[in-house]
Image (spheres, rainbow, N blue to C red):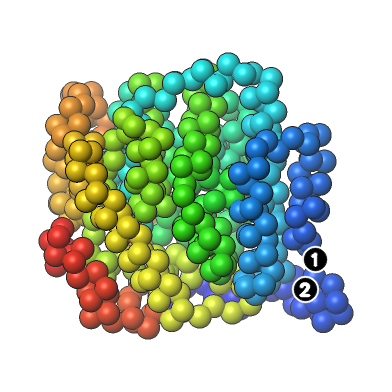
Amino acid sequence: MGLASNQLPQGMRLLNRAGKLLRSAGFNPPSLSQDVLLRKASRATGLNDFGDDLHREGLTRLLDALEQEAELTTLGRLMAADSIKHDLIARLEMVDYRKRNPEVDKEEIKAPIFIAGLPRTGTTILYNLLSQDPSRRVPLSWEVVYPVPPPQEESYTTDPRIEKTRKRFAQTDALVPDLKAIHPVEALLPEECSTFTSREFQSRNYSYVFDIPSYYDWYVNRPQVDVYQAHRRYLQHLQFHYKKDRWLLKAPQHLPFIGDIFEVYGDAQLIQTHRNPCDVIPSQASLVYQMRAVTQESVDTAAIGKEKLDRWGWALDRAQATRDAIPERAKQICDVRFPDLMADPLGQIERLYDHFDWDFNADVKKRMEDFMKNNPRDKHGTHRYTLEMFSLTPEQVRQRFAHYMERYELG
């Protein structure tokens, strides 16, 4: 099923074998010591101020979980160390930039649009279509990966960091060649804002790539208001030299934190997408399998299936409970069903524009039509998966999501 650990490029397999020999001799490089990673990030930037302490507990819990739970290969350790160091560097540079440019604090974030929903429910196509509206500001991958200095409008599509980002993504493509068919990433495509919160070490991103249940459980069960306040600071930074009418943002991890979003962004508008979980759960499990097969000594597909069933079931339950508790926010929320979006994308877009009283003019419509023509579904290949691959049955999934499926008429 897809890429297994023993199908890695030969050089990566040799690296992992060498790592096993070193571990048997009492060595386990590279280091995942917090002090070591902090020092490396400081040396790389010449900076020492990591800002407030919001990130500290998350970083500690993440590193503990990686050491104690993830069963990392040497390649997995290298990827973890590189990712954490990269997030620490971005944090150092953003704190330094804000200290030198305190006027960033005055940037106003007006009525941001959040797309939330289970993964694989049409969030990406909706995100890409809505981003064709020139009044929307979306975070592109390159500026999220390398946020300092803030992007300039005149060089937004020519900044040298674009090519730098492509090279970074190419490394992932080489390790997980099927990833583009599941979740395409590109330097000039809109990026999920869960990367913002990874700099606070409170993000689902790490738990996709590594099996770290203690970190995940801690993260999802703590209040997220302070994380969304940090999220706002990130938006202020990115729009400092290039702003539009409002931000358009997307990440499945927003789903259980709708209440926290509205507490920080009182004028936010939320789009929740919906799809039959019998299609969603194996697709999400396949993505996680592809990533963990690269980073771990072994991957239990049945455990991944149960993990996705439990975690996304909990997220949906919490999202719906929150929505039911805030009926006064109903005009700020609109639902989109995946079958409707696939059957008539522009019809659903027009419905959203009508609900939120946005201007769906001829230019916006033409831009969206052109995007669909140039980006057909399955452009990067077909993603194939089944529930059986992850030891699940349709009956199990329907039972867990019965109320949700009935509420949104999902089969």
The earlier-in-sequence mark between 1 and 2 is 2
- Crowding at dot 2, Cα within 10 Å, few <14 / some 14-19 / many 20+, comes out as many
Mark 1 touches mark 2? (CB < 8 Å): yes
Question: Which quadrant holds residue 307?
Answer: bottom left
Question: Which quadrant holds residue 128?
Answer: top left
- Crowding at dot 1, Cα within 10 Å, few <14 / some 14-19 / many 20+, comes out as some
Q: In the displayed structure, would residue 90 be above or below residue 157? A: below
* Quadrant housing the C terminus: bottom left
Give x and y (percent) for residue 299. Answer: 54, 78
Question: Which quadrant holds residue 313?
Answer: bottom left
* Quadrant housing the N terminus: bottom left
Location of mark 1 (residue) = 29
Residue drawn where x is 32% and y is 77% of the image:
387
Give x and y (percent) for residue 223. Answer: 46, 50
Q: Is residue 399 visible?
A: yes
Give x and y (percent) for residue 11. Answer: 71, 68
User: The disc labelled 2 sits on which kind of residue?
Assistant: Gly
